[in-house]
Image (cartoon, rainbow, N blue to C red):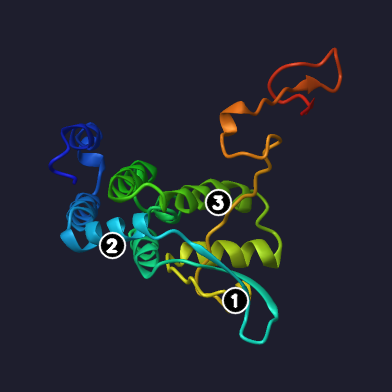
Amino acid sequence: LYLSDPSIVRAIKSFGPSLLPECHGKLLQMGSSCGALELNHAAEIAEKNRPSLRQFDNYGRRIDIIDYNPSYHKLMQHGIEYGTIAYGFSEMRKVPHSHIIRAALIYMENQLEPGHCCPLVMTTAAIPLLERHNHTDFTKELLQKIYNMKYDHRDLPIQQKSGVTIGMSMTEKQGGSDVRLNTTTASPIESHRQGPGCSYSL
């Protein structure tokens, strides 16, 4: 998926010699992996098998666990271990343009199967916020488990997991699934102060 895509090759080449040779190697590896028959077969299976809710265990106790097809876990593991979440941040002190490399990685991962990329990009988006508030044990632990680049799908407390992803919740006033029908308005809290950096009420 890398060498067969002129757009991404041209974009990467535009950064010239400032990209380390191992970056090109990583992109070649990712392109080859995303184009492999085995992963594409896993993507097809994941698409055809929706997650299912398991509300109770064998003893009638409420557990509310979402069961995913093993193929979905395979895709998630692939994306995380190849650095589609953390590479841009974890390598930015050592690798020039590490965020460009991460963008190319998630671009190829998305062509494999877009659905599982949602938790990948949400976790990436959470990293700057966690870094900004990286003064509590909890945020430090979250960052460490994101930077581990390990996928751990087990339903366990964060402290017992080797890796985590970050998600978000969303409410929709019309109760459907078409978020395009939602509207959000922002009003300045102080009428005389408007513009970037000012406070607004949503």
Contact between marks 3 and 2 (CB within 8 A): the answer is no
Location of residue 181 (image quadrant): top right
Q: Position of residue 37 (x, y in %)?
A: 16, 59
Residue drawn at (37%, 65%), measured in percent from left and top? 77
In the image, taking residue 164 as reference, residue 76 lies left or right, namely: left
Q: Nearer the viewer, residue 122 or 90?
A: 122
Q: CA distance from mark 3 to mark 2?
A: 28 Å
Location of residue 70 (image quadrant): bottom left
Three-letter code, disc 1:
Leu
Residue drawn at (78%, 26%), measured in percent from left and top? 200
Label 1 or label 2, whichever comes before in sequence order: 2
Q: Nearer the viewer, residue 39 or 159?
A: 39
> Which residue does the numbered mark 2 point to in the structure image?
42
Q: Which disc number belongs to residue 142?
A: none
Q: Position of residue 52 (x, y in %)?
A: 51, 64
Q: What is the crowding at mark 2: few (fewer than 14 residues within 10 Å), some, or many (at least 20)?
A: some
> Which residue does the numbered mark 1 point to in the structure image?
156
Location of residue 87 (image quadrant): bottom left
Q: Is residue 117 above or below residue 195?
A: below
In the image, taking residue 110 as reference, residue 124 lies left or right, namely: right
Q: CA distance from mark 1 to mark 2?
A: 25 Å
Three-letter code, disc 2:
Ala
Which element carries disc 2, helix, strand or loop?
Answer: helix
Q: What is the crowding at mark 3: few (fewer than 14 residues within 10 Å), some, or many (at least 20)?
A: many
> Which residue does the numbered mark 3 point to in the structure image?
127
